[in-house]
């Protein structure tokens, strides 16, 4: 992505970021503030949107272009409304079903272009067909800090699922091995009728397609699952759960 690169000189010492942008880009304060509000300005590789941020000689200021390359179209699913939470270190976005977490044409790919941050990185994964909150690191240092928390299982992963059939047990633990490796899923039934059940699920391990495979193992496949269960449409009775 193209960007304008600026260097803070001795004569700029102590200047606010807003004043620096206005002076060096020949902008009004209003237009300079719009760049900050659009999260398009980086100082020393970190996104900064505080107008009163003080600059030091030698600081590098980068202004990302607003429009993404022509080879990618966000579409209605990737927009500012997709972002649920944002700080200078982390971002949480709403990943829709049917979209990859990372890679070409993924949520990560689209958000990098939308927000003008090529360093944005998904720090965990959700299956293509799974919707939910996806956590991103805004820069490499933030990613390095949070990765160990996932390795140490200090991040709780909780899901909701609609499955086929009536699940009578209010709580259960599924420990069916996956690919000859131990796997553990905690399940709580929130509501149920004869055709379908609404489950709350927490993963203790992170095996490939663990939720879907464990649900099949107990005889209650995820409704609409394209790989491990039926591909039929969800019936009106099942939608009333």
Image (cartoon, rainbow, N blue to C red):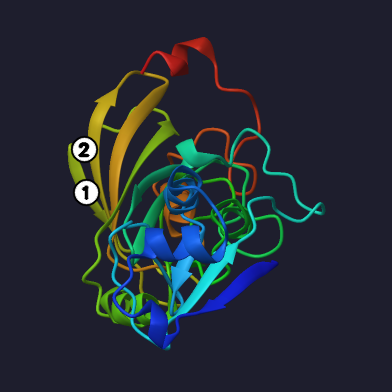
**Would you say residue 122 is visible in this rendering?**
no
Instruction: Give the residue number, with chain letter if any, for mark 1.
Output: 172
Residue 221 sits above or below residue 3 on the image? above
Expressed as whole percent of the image width and height from the top left, the position of residue 76 reads 63, 33
Q: Is residue 10 left or right of residue 129?
A: left
Residue to which mark 2 is pinned: 169
Question: For this rendering, which residue is in front, 134 or 138?
Answer: 138
Which residue is at the far left? Answer: 170
Tell me the residue at 42%/20% (across/down): 195
* Quarter assignment of residue 73: top right
Taking the spot 24% from the left edge, 35% from the top edge, the residue there is 189
Q: Secondary structure at mark 1?
A: strand
Q: Residue at x 57, y 61 (%)?
A: 25
Give the distance between the C-alpha atoms of the residues marked 1 and 2, in whole angstroms: 7 Å
Q: Residue at the spot x=55%, y=39% of the render?
A: 79
Picture coordinates of residue 64 (x, y %)? 59, 62
- Horizontal side of 143 relative to 152 (left or right) equals right
Q: Decide: marks 1, 2 in contact (CB < 8 A)?
A: yes
């Amino acid at each position: 992505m193209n960007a304008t690169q600026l260097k803070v000189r001795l004569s700029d010492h102590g200047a606010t970021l807003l004043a620096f942008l206005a002076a060096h880009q020949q902008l009004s304060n209003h237009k300079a503030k719009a760049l900050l509000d659009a999260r398009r300005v980086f100082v020393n590789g970190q996104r900064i949107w505080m107008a009163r941020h003080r600059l030091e000689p030698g600081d590098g200021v980068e202004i990302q272009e607003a429009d993404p390359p022509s080879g990618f179209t966000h579409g209605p699913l990737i927009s500012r409304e997709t972002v649920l939470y944002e700080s200078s270190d982390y971002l949480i976005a709403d990943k829709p079903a049917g979209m990859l977490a990372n890679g070409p044409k993924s949520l990560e790919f689209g958000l990098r272009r939308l927000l003008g941050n090529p360093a944005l990185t998904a720090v965990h994964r959700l299956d293509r067909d799974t919707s939910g909150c996806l956590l991103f690191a805004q820069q490499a240092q933030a990613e390095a800090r949070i990765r160990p928390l996932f390795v140490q299982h200090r991040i709780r992963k909780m899901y909701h699922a609609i499955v086929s059939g009536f699940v009578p047990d209010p709580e259960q633990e599924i420990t069916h091995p996956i690919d000859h490796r131990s796997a553990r899923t905690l399940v709580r039934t929130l509501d149920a009728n004869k055709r379908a059940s609404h489950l709350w699920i927490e993963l203790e391990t992170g095996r490939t397609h663990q939720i879907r495979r464990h649900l099949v193992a107990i005889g209650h496949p995820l409704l609409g699952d394209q790989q491990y269960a039926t591909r039929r449409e969800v019936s009106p009775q099942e939608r009333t759960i």
